[in-house]
């Protein structure tokens, strides 16, 4: 990202809500998305992320609040007049038109010169590497090819914002991973703001500049992938993005940006305060990712060690997931070990030693929406 | 896109005029008004007429039940109505009974050609109704195919006279006419049955007959009922078939209705006969539905 | 389903049923080529003379022309009206939808003679003389439900995101209807046209009551049935009409099926 944080945002959402009857699909949302950013809306199904995307596109009318795109208020503007284009979840390739006609669909309205129109279609098809299939009909295309046509059809319009509604969910795993890389590099190449809706945390982590995690119509955290994963703001976010060991801890000291907490068996640790953190009667929750706990073999020594016993083991190919019971902890700890040293052979009931890094702990806020 | 965005923003129409409801109503209204003007309004006028009386060309608009008294209690109309109901019930029963195995065959043994089978079954129903009834006259007539064929074969030596011009001939021709209309709804309801339900019944020990009675028949009952009604309601008022193959003994109510609008020129009586027919058919339809439901309760 | 109890009987029944279904209809073309005025067995030899007589019959030609006028107009009108209603029913939610579509579909389950006489009464009531125009009015009412069923199933398979995609690409509501909706549902529209034309061509009751002095083909045939001597030429005419119906319906079915298989292919994708 070359943009400074102070640049005016490409999309500015203020006080946005959508109610279906009394049910709030999106409630009181404030969000800025920067120009040229690959931004993901991540959350479980029904969290309102698609509703939000469709409000940006103009297919859903907000109940309250406003949306500005590039400084222009588009709240009352219909979808065909917005500087946004969308890649639909099922791609919505027009079945009666061939690939070129699909891609050129929106250009027709602009009344370009024939040669210019053709040039832009060719360029868009090249961008998605489909130049050889221009004459094919929709029903003659594979899922991956359809996805590219949908992409080219939107890109050719040179939108200010490209909206992608779970564009990879219909593809099989291998193709999906290829497309993730390709979409990401395409976005960097064209420099258009992309907004991706997904329920797949790995997809969001792999592709995005920033991720907004949504639950029940509210933003739970908006941050870079690394920050979201390493410093989840709340227990919900931590849980949604991979495994996390949660520990009850006691607040022992509090300063401007940091707090000291004490957790059973782990002793005192200093942690930075997440946004919106308030301690209620001294009890807090801290978390540590399973891969930040490490098995110690034979003579290995670490500054911070813990003794435990293997309670359960699950083999996942390159890694093994272990459940370790530790005396004095209410819950056993989950750890993930690569299978280079024989973690996959550890018998259940074996006594082991664990190492941990106090910096790996995160303090989790009570679940409450943020303003981004 | 950018150039479009410069235009003053005409906002999405809000409020009722632009709502889904308004658009839906606006779109359906031409068709609905057409049906209102040419179906509902005419039927209301028929109902109005049925309470009036006619003397040659003048209509007397004093309210009277006289026409209904005639329609319900004069022996000829009573007979005609009863016969029409009897014939249409017979036709419905026969059509459903004959159609069910065909629908079954297509649904369970039709393989990849279900659509082709359905098409073959429906084609005859789309050919001219008049011609189909006429062909029965050709078959059953005194000098018809059946009589001359049988005589040629030496099975009979005189033409059978009881083949044509009676209620049976009407029934046969009507069953032939309505066959496909009964197959389609039954087929649709058989198709909807989740095949794993049948496997589950087998798994729980039911043989073919029990499976049919306990699973397939109850689940296809909506199709059977609608097939029955789709055949029964229109056949009550059939005009062509009794005229062509019914003779004196096969006359049905439609002939009487037509006569009152034609030669006899007693519109109010014709109207009362029409209304009576509609009401009686509706009652019968209700009774049929109720009857099937009770039957299913007994079977279960 | 391997159920042994019906299998041996079922194919036999199916065959018998098809004989019952097709037999009577096949007699019409068979006797139309029979070299005798009476429809008796055995057949008296092959002839095409009954067909030869048709073009010289001016009353028949007039009736045929009337049928064409009525058929074309009715199929256009009923398809147009059914498009509006089918679109409203499949696309929008509004109060009274069930009642309204119920009334539109009612001619399907009303005895036809009642539709016919009630129309006759209202037309005469308002002083409209009987003509081809009144036949068109009546048959359109009668054909709309059939057109609706064909179109509703066509519209239901229509993916709404296609329209959204079009709007998203800058197209107006009308432009979207013209450039996306219409072409995609074109097969359903075409088959609605063919089906309603076929129904109109064969429809008798409404034409009989409403045509006045301008008979359509079925009304003409009805008039001829009284004369035994006219039977062979009626059979020849009937054969041509059956042929026309079968061809039109086959075309409609092929269009429908091709659209269907393309849609299935589209939905499941090619790999």
Image: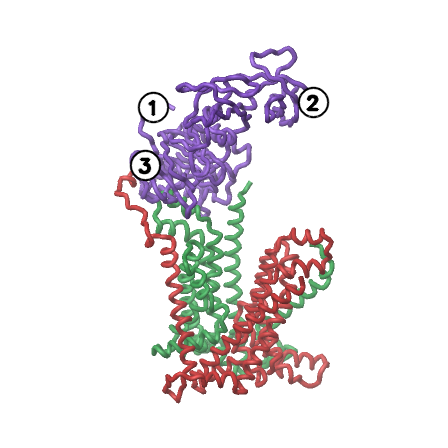
Residue positioned 50% across, 75% down in the render: B279
Residue A317 badge: none
Say which of C261 and B157 sits in front.
C261
Coordinates of residue C99 in the picture (x, y in percent):
44, 63
B256, above or below A205, in the image: below
In the figure, the shade used to draw chain A is purple
Q: Earlier in the sequence, mark 1 or mark 3?
A: 1
Say which of C111 and B1 sits in front.
C111
In the figure, the shade used to draw chain B is red
Residue positioned 51% across, 46% down in the render: C266
Say which residue label 3 marks.
Answer: A68
Residue positioned 73% across, 60% down in the render: C5
Q: Are marks 2 and 1 in contact (CB under 8 Å)?
A: no
How far apart marks 1 and 3 lie (CA) works out to 19 Å
Q: Earlier in the sequence, mark 2 or mark 3?
A: 3
Residue positioned 40% across, 64% down in the render: B32
Coordinates of residue C264 in the picture (x, y in percent):
53, 49
How far apart marks 2 and 3 lie (CA) works out to 59 Å
Query: Which subunit holds the residue at mark 2?
Result: A
């Amino acid at each position: 990202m070359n943009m400074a944080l102070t640049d005016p945002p490409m999309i500015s959402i203020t006080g946005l809500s959508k109610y279906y009857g009394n049910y709030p699909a999106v409630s009181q949302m404030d969000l800025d998305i920067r120009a040229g950013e690959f931004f993901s809306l991540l959350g479980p199904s029904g969290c309102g992320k698609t509703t939000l995307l469709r409000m940006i596109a103009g297919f859903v009318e907000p109940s309250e609040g406003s949306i500005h795109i590039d400084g222009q208020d588009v709240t009352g503007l219909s979808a065909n007049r917005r500087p946004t284009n969308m890649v639909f979840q099922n791609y919505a390739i027009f079945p009666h038109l061939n690939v070129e006609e699909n891609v050129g669909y929106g250009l027709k309205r602009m009344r370009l010169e024939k040669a210019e129109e053709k040039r832009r279609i060719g360029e868009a098809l090249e961008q998605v590497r489909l130049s050889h299939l221009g004459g094919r009909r929709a029903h003659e295309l594979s899922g991956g090819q359809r996805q590219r046509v949908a992409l080219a059809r939107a890109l050719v319009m040179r939108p200010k914002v490209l909206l992608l509604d779970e564009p990879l969910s219909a593809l099989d795993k291998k193709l999906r991973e290829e497309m993730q890389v390709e979409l990401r590099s395409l976005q960097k190449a064209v420099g258009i703001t992309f907004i991706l809706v997904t329920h797949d945390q790995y997809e969001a982590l792999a592709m995005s500049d920033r991720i907004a995690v949504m639950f029940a119509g509210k933003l739970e955290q908006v941050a870079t992938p690394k920050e979201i994963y390493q410093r989840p703001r709340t227990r919900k976010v931590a849980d949604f993005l991979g495994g996390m060991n949660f520990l009850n801890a006691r607040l022992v000291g509090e300063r401007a940006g940091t707090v000291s907490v004490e957790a059973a068996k782990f002793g005192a640790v200093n942690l930075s305060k997440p946004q919106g953190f308030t301690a209620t009667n001294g009890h807090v929750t801290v978390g540590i990712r399973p891969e930040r706990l490490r098995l110690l073999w034979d003579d290995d020594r670490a500054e911070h060690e813990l003794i435990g016993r293997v309670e359960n083991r699950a083999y996942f190919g390159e890694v093994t997931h272990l459940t370790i019971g530790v005396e004095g902890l209410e819950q056993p700890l989950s750890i993930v070990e690569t299978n280079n040293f024989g973690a996959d052979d550890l018998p259940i009931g074996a006594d082991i030693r664990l190492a941990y890094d106090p910096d790996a702990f995160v303090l989790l806020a009570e679940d409450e929406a943020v303003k981004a | 896109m950018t150039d479009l965005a410069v235009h003053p923003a005409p906002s999405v129409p809000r409020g009722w005029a632009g709502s889904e409801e308004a658009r839906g109503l606006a779109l359906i209204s031409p068709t609905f008004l057409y049906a209102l003007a040419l179906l509902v309004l005419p039927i209301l006028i028929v109902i109005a007429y049925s309470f009036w009386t006619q003397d040659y060309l003048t209509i007397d608009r004093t309210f009277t039940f006289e026409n209904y008294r005639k329609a319900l209690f004069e022996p000829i109309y009573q007979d005609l109505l009863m016969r029409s109901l009897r014939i249409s019930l017979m036709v419905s029963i026969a059509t459903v009974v004959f159609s069910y195995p065909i629908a079954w065959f297509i649904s369970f043994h039709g393989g990849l050609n279900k659509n082709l089978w359905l098409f073959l079954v429906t084609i005859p129903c789309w050919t001219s109704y008049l011609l189909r009834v006429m062909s029965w006259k050709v078959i059953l007539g005194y000098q018809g195919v059946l009589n001359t064929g049988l005589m040629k074969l030496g099975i009979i030596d005189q033409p059978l006279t009881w083949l044509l011009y009676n209620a049976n001939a009407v029934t046969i021709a009507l069953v032939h006419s309505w066959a496909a209309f009964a197959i389609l709804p039954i087929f649709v309801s058989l198709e909807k049955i989740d095949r794993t339900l049948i496997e589950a019944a087998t798994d729980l020990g039911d043989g073919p007959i029990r499976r049919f009675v306990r699973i397939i028949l109850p689940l296809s009952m909506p199709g059977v009922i609608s097939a029955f009604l789709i055949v029964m309601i229109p056949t009550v008022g059939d005009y062509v078939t009794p005229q062509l193959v019914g003779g004196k003994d096969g006359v049905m109510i439609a002939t009487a209705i037509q006569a009152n609008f034609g030669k006899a020129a007693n519109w109010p009586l014709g109207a009362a006969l029409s209304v009576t027919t509609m009401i009686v058919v509706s009652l019968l339809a209700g009774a049929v539905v109720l009857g099937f439901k009770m039957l299913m309760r007994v079977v279960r | 389903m391997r159920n042994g109890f019906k299998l041996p009987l079922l194919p036999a029944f199916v065959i018998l049923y098809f004989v019952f279904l097709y037999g009577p209809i096949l007699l019409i073309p068979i006797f139309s080529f029979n070299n005798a005025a009476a429809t008796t067995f055995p057949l008296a030899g092959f002839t095409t003379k009954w067909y030869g007589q048709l073009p010289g019959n001016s009353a028949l030609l007039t009736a045929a022309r009337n049928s064409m006028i009525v058929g074309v107009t009715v199929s256009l009108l009923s398809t147009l009206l059914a498009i509006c209603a089918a679109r409203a029913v499949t696309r929008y939610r509004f109060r009274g939808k069930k009642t309204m579509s119920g009334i539109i579909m009612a001619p399907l389950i009303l005895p036809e003679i009642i539709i016919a006489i009630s129309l006759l009464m209202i037309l005469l009531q308002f002083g409209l003389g009987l003509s081809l125009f009144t036949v068109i009015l009546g048959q359109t009412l009668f054909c709309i439900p059939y057109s609706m069923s064909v179109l509703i199933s066509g519209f239901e398979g229509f993916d709404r995101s296609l329209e959204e995609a079009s709007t998203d690409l800058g197209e107006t509501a009308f432009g979207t209807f013209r450039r996306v909706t219409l072409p995609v549902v074109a097969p359903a529209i075409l088959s609605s046209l063919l089906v309603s034309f076929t129904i109109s061509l064969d429809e008798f009751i409404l034409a009989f009551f409403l045509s006045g002095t301008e008979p359509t083909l079925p009304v003409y045939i009805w008039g001829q049935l009284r004369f035994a001597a006219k039977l062979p030429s009626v059979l020849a005419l009937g054969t041509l009409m059956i042929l026309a119906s079968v061809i039109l319906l086959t075309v409609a079915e092929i269009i429908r099926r091709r659209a269907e298989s393309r849609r299935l292919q589209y939905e499941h994708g090619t790999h």
